[in-house]
Image (cartoon, rainbow, N blue to C red):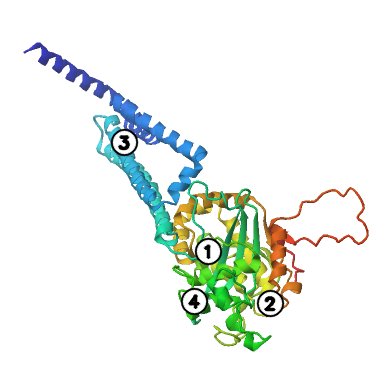
């Protein structure tokens, strides 16, 4: 026999001896070490004699944990960019599945190396069952993670189109390098569209503007009444030429004109003047953006439209919302007057007053919508409190455990002209809003719109500007001379934590 063949034989015998040495342990010890190998991928390979491969797997595992921790703690913007990019989310799904399969392979391979050479039938069966459970324990979260990532991809792709794949007649172009460079305040129009069964067309019963300070997240909520008439348009809009004195019919003088209410504009103007604003995916929303801009003196950047029928799903997916109810709120009920009605009906029941009421989707919808026997102003207040409760309900634990349900509901719930390119910056801004001051701007109903026939939009614009840019207070140095004009009373704002508190003496 040649010298090389004898040397090879000695190496083979030596390696077999080492493997036998590694496998002279009990079944219980092998199961324990296999569990350890699942917690520390690669450690089982090292203990089984495959030291180089085990060291490589351990290094890769530690590297993945370190990279994950680094991006999670120090590169949040990059994580958000992945979370709102359909292409990157698809890659992320593939990576999650691949890592799960590799983890399972490492556990199985480690057990084969660690287990004793001779095992009883019962020991072999027990060890196999344990390894199977370990693999199942890895496969389940891997599958859930992959499904969650795909649900996020589906949500982003369904609701948020890219800037090049969508059309809007009113939104600004996105500055991809610094989205807020020229936007000190982001103004978003929030629409609640009532397009339920039995109603003709779509009427926006909820119209609200969220004005957000892009530096601090400080947010002002401004509610517009559904029965406002003579809604103005910017002078450079083609709609201004058609309605220079606002949206109404001057031939009917000073009477209520439900088909010229704010809540009828979304449906009526596109039907009467299709394509007047140019190419757009939602002409009704663009009409309301222009009208709200002129009425409040704000540049409305984007809109978010909520389908009220799908609102129940999102609340149920979040596990409900908690609100304070200060007076009885009707469930159902209709006066039977005006367009879109189904005839006069009484409420089927009422939400009763009480603090910290946990509401499901159905009751939360009527908490926000109920108005039979109440005023529009009270409904606007409850709608602001509903938004406040939704923001507070979206905690990390709920989002992680129920994200698939939330994403599925979001697809049916939302419509918007916010492009995908803006989403990373918008999510970062949303995190600021959760920690910042959110308040309501009082537009002074008694003075500026005691009814909806002829609101004082000029006075409301002044109040909005005072609320967004409050005058700086200075210490007076001398007494004012007689006849000196005093400053106008600043706009009234109220923190939503206080506005939505339990105070059952509040009038409805």
- Please, is residue 249 above or below residue 144 in the view? below
The residue identified by callout 3 is 106
Q: Looking at the image, which residue is at 71% across and 73% down? A: 456
Q: Earlier in the sequence, mark 1 or mark 2?
A: 1
Q: In 3D space, how far apart are the residues under numbered discs 1 and 4 (Cα atoms)? A: 18 Å
Q: Secondary structure at mark 1?
A: strand
Closer to us: 199 or 491: 491
The residue identified by callout 1 is 304
**Mark carried by residue 374:** 2
Q: In 3D space, how far apart are the residues under numbered discs 4 and 3 (Cα atoms)? A: 61 Å
Q: Secondary structure at mark 4?
A: helix
- Please, is residue 66 above or below residue 244 in the view? above
Q: Earlier in the sequence, mark 4 or mark 2?
A: 4
The residue identified by callout 4 is 270
Q: In 3D space, how far apart are the residues under numbered discs 3 and 1 (Cα atoms)? A: 47 Å
Q: Residues within 10 Å of mark 1 (few under 14, many from 20)?
A: some
In the rendered image, the quadrant that contains the C terminus is bottom right
């Amino acid at each position: 026999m040649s010298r090389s063949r004898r040397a090879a034989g000695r190496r083979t015998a030596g390696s077999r001896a080492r493997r036998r040495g590694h496998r002279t342990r009990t079944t219980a010890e092998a199961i324990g070490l296999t569990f350890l190998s699942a917690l520390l991928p690669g450690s089982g390979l090292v203990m089984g004699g495959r030291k180089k491969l085990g060291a490589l797997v351990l290094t890769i595992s530690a590297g993945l944990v370190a990279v994950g921790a680094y991006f999670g703690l120090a590169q949040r913007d990059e994580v958000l960019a992945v979370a709102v990019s359909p292409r990157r989310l698809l890659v992320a799904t593939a990576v999650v599945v691949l890592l799960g399969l590799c983890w399972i392979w490492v556990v199985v391979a480690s057990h084969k190396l660690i287990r004793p050479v001779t095992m009883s039938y019962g020991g072999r069966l027990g060890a196999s069952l344990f390894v199977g459970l370990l693999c199942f324990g890895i496969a389940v979260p891997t599958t859930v993670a992959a499904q969650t990532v795909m649900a996020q991809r589906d949500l982003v792709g369904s609701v948020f189109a890219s800037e090049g794949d969508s059309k809007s007649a009113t939104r600004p172009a996105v500055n991809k390098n610094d989205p807020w460079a020229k936007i000190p305040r982001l103004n978003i129009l929030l629409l609640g569209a009532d397009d339920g069964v039995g109603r003709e067309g779509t009427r926006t019963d909820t119209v609200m503007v969220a004005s957000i300070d892009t530096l601090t997240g400080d947010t002002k909520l401004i509610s517009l009444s559904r029965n406002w008439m003579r809604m103005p348009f910017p002078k450079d809009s083609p709609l201004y030429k058609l309605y220079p004195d606002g949206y109404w019919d001057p031939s009917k003088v000073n009477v209520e004109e439900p088909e010229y209410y704010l809540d009828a504009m979304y449906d009526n103007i596109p039907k009467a003047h299709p394509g007047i604003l140019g190419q757009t995916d939602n002409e009704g929303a663009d009409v309301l953006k222009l009208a709200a801009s002129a009425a409040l003196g704000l540049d409305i950047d984007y809109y978010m439209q909520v389908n009220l029928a799908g609102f129940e799903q999102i609340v149920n997916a979040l596990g409900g919302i908690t609100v304070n109810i200060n007076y009885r709120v009707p469930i159902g009920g209709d006066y039977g007057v005006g367009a879109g009605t189904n005839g006069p009906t009484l409420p089927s029941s009422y939400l009763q007053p009480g603090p910290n009421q946990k509401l499901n989707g159905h009751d939360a919808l009527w908490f926000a919508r109920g108005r039979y026997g109440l005023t529009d102003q009270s409904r606007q207040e409850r709608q602001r409190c509903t938004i406040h409760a939704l923001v507070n309900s979206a905690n990390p634990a709920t989002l992680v455990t129920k994200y698939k349900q939330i994403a599925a509901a979001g697809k049916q719930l939302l419509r918007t002209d916010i492009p995908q390119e803006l989403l990373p910056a918008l999510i970062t801004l949303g995190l600021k809003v959760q920690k910042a001051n959110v308040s309501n701007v009082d537009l002074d109903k008694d003075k500026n719109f005691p009814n909806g026939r002829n609101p004082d939009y000029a006075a409301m614009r002044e109040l909005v500007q005072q609320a967004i840019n409050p005058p700086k207070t200075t210490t007076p140095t001398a007494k004012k001379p007689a006849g000196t004009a005093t400053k106008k009373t600043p706009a009234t704002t109220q923190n939503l934590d206080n506005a939505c508190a339990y105070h059952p003496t509040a009038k409805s």
